[in-house]
Image (spheres, rainbow, N blue to C red):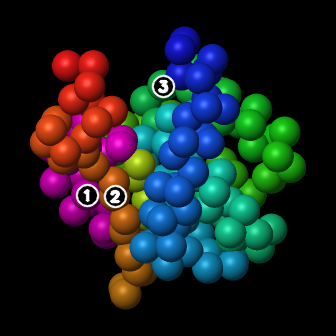
């Protein structure tokens, strides 16, 4: 569970990416936001702060342990507007147009058919809504990957 031990460091190092995803998805106060493959809660918690108490965040992931830690982090931050659901992206089932935005930070890219999953998730968004996904480039463009290699 290195992700738990390093969560504070990762949150600090990656906060700008979570903020940018929330910005690109045009998350507004009162919005309902879906975070796909949220892991232990980012960018879900960043979005939860942005939407405020009138908004709602649904964070999904396949790891029950990571989601449990995300719940702990949300409770510690007094973010009662975040819900955590165990599911892979292709297994999500929400009514059409039930979200105002969707985000995924280095998560949905690991789906076996990420493009199909993204298309399915798009159906959960209201018309005109945005989905923001972060991904990695080639290893030589990503020091985080290329240095260890």
**C-alpha span from label 2 to label 1:** 9 Å
Describe the element under mark 3 as helix, strand or loop.
loop
Residue 41, how many percent across, how many down?
Answer: 59, 41
Task: Tell me the residue at 63%/57% (across/down).
Answer: 46
Quarter of the N terminus within the rendering? top right
- Identify the residue under disc 2: 133
Residue 121, how many percent across, how many down?
Answer: 33, 60
Q: Would you place residue 80 above or below residue 47 in this image?
A: above
Task: Tell me the residue at 33%/54% (across/down).
Answer: 134
Viewer-proximal residue among 136 and 105: 136
The answer to whether residue 100 shows anywhere in this view is no
Sequence order check: which comes first, mark 3 or mark 2?
A: 3
Mark sitting on residue 21: none
The answer to the question of whether label 3 and label 2 lie on touching residues, with beta carbons closer than 8 A, is no
> In which image quadrant can residue 19 be found?
bottom right
Taking the magenta stretch, the answer to whether it contains residue 85 is: no
> In which image quadrant can residue 125 be found?
bottom left
Task: Tell me the residue at 76%/69% (across/down).
Answer: 52
The answer to the question of whether label 2 and label 1 lie on touching residues, with beta carbons closer than 8 A, is yes
The answer to the question of whether label 3 and label 1 lie on touching residues, with beta carbons closer than 8 A, is no
Q: Nearer the viewer, mark 3 or mark 2?
A: 2
Sequence order check: which comes first, mark 2 or mark 1?
A: 1
Q: Nearer the viewer, mark 2 or mark 1?
A: 2
Describe the element under mark 2 as helix, strand or loop.
strand
Residue 39, how many percent across, how many down?
Answer: 50, 35
- Identify the residue under disc 1: 118
Residue 30, how many percent across, how many down?
Answer: 69, 77
- Identify the residue under disc 3: 63
Q: Which residues are magenta?
A: 106-124
């Amino acid at each position: 569970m290195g992700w738990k031990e390093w969560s504070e460091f990762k949150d600090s190092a990656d906060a700008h990416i979570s903020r940018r995803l929330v910005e690109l998805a045009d998350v507004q106060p009162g919005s309902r936001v879906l975070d796909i493959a949220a892991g232990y809660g980012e960018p879900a918690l960043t979005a939860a702060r942005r939407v405020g108490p009138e908004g709602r965040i649904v964070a999904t992931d396949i790891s029950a342990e990571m989601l449990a830690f995300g719940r702990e982090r949300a409770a510690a931050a007094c973010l009662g507007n975040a819900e955590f659901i165990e599911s892979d992206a292709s297994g999500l089932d929400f009514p059409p147009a039930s979200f105002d935005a969707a985000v995924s930070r280095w998560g949905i890219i690991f789906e076996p058919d990420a493009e199909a999953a993204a298309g399915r998730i798009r159906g959960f968004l209201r018309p005109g809504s945005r989905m923001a996904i972060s991904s990695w480039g080639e290893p030589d463009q990503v020091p985080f990957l290329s240095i260890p290699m």
